[in-house]
Image: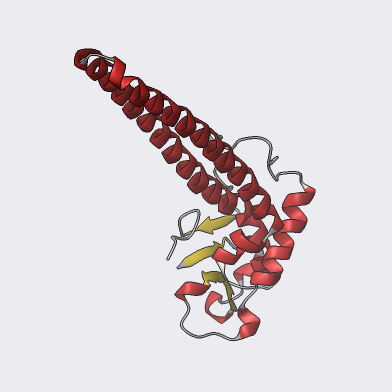
């Protein structure tokens, strides 16, 4: 998968043959796993997930107690009264389940959006490494069959991402929920992006 290609500017760059320039490799999964910047993004999402789980546990406990109360009162109720309460309880449970499922879907979408936004936000940082190395392209490691270890700049990219993004204060606050966050902004035209914002999961 071709990740980024330089848009050459200046006479010196124009005189170079792109085919003679080195090709670099980066493990894009590791960028999102290993960088402290990405870890802070995931920490905010994990906080959302924990809050949702705690809320689900409270709801389940309350519904369990309500069901137990109905079961205990059943011998003292007419069949019609019991059926009416049981139907109302079932309707209530189904509505709650739909609402909880919707929140789970929203959280998963937030995770996907945060990952996409991460790759958009660090694209120029990784692209700068490409320009510094005088390379013509960076490939996702998963698309490479064989390469020299020296062509893999993943560790350097992780360090550079943390140095640039954390110093700029762009990492999210883990106490602030990311659900319903803003869309990632479009990158500038310094680099020509020839892939999705983030690589597809294997």
- 31 over 145 or under it: above or below: above
- Number of marks in the rendered image: 0
Query: In this orientation, which residue lies closer to the viewer: 174 or 120?
Result: 174
The percent coordinates of residue 34 (x first, y second) are 65, 63
State how the image is colored. Answer: secondary structure
Residue extending furthest toward the right: 167
- 67 over 149 or under it: above or below: above
Q: Residue at x 46, y 83 (%)?
A: 145
Query: In this orientation, which residue lies closer to the viewer: 175 or 91?
Result: 91
- 137 over 46 or under it: above or below: below
Q: Is residue 57 left or right of residue 154?
A: left
Quadrant (top left/top right/bottom left/bottom right) for the N terminus: bottom left
Q: Is residue 148 visible?
A: yes
Residue extending furthest toward the left: 80
Query: In this orientation, which residue lies closer to the viewer: 74 or 165?
Result: 74
Q: Is residue 126 left or right of residue 169?
A: left
The percent coordinates of residue 107 (x first, y second) are 49, 40
Q: Residue at x 46, y 60 (%)?
A: 194
The percent coordinates of residue 136 (x first, y second) are 57, 71
Query: In this orientation, which residue lies closer to the viewer: 8 or 92?
Result: 92
Q: Residue at x 57, y 54 (%)?
A: 119
Quadrant (top left/top right/bottom left/bottom right) for the C terminus: bottom left
Residue extending furthest toward the front: 75
The percent coordinates of residue 50 (x first, y second) are 58, 42
Q: Place residue 190 in its image quadrant.
A: bottom right
Q: Residue at x 62, y 80 (%)?
A: 151
Q: Is residue 189 visible?
A: no
- 18 over 199 or under it: above or below: below
Q: Place residue 104 in its image quadrant.
A: top left
């Amino acid at each position: 998968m071709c990740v980024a290609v330089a848009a050459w500017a200046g006479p010196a760059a124009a005189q170079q043959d792109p085919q003679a320039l080195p090709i670099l490799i980066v493990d894009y999964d590791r960028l999102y796993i290993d960088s402290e910047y990405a870890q802070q993004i995931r920490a905010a999402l994990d906080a959302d997930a924990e809050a949702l789980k705690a809320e689900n546990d409270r709801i389940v406990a309350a519904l369990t107690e309500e069901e137990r109360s109905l079961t205990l009162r059943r011998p003292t109720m007419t069949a019609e009264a019991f059926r009416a309460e049981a139907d109302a309880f079932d309707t209530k449970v189904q509505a709650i389940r739909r609402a909880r499922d919707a929140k789970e879907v929203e959280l998963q979408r937030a995770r996907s959006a945060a990952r996409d936004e991460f790759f958009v936000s660090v694209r120029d940082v990784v692209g700068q490494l490409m320009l510094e190395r005088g390379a013509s392209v960076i490939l996702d490691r998963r698309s490479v069959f064989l390469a020299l270890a020296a062509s893999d700049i993943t560790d350097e990219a992780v360090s550079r991402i943390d140095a640039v993004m954390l110093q700029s204060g762009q990492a999210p606050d883990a106490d602030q929920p990311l659900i319903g966050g803003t869309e990632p902004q479009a990158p500038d035209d310094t680099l020509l992006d020839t892939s999705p914002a983030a690589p597809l999961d294997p």
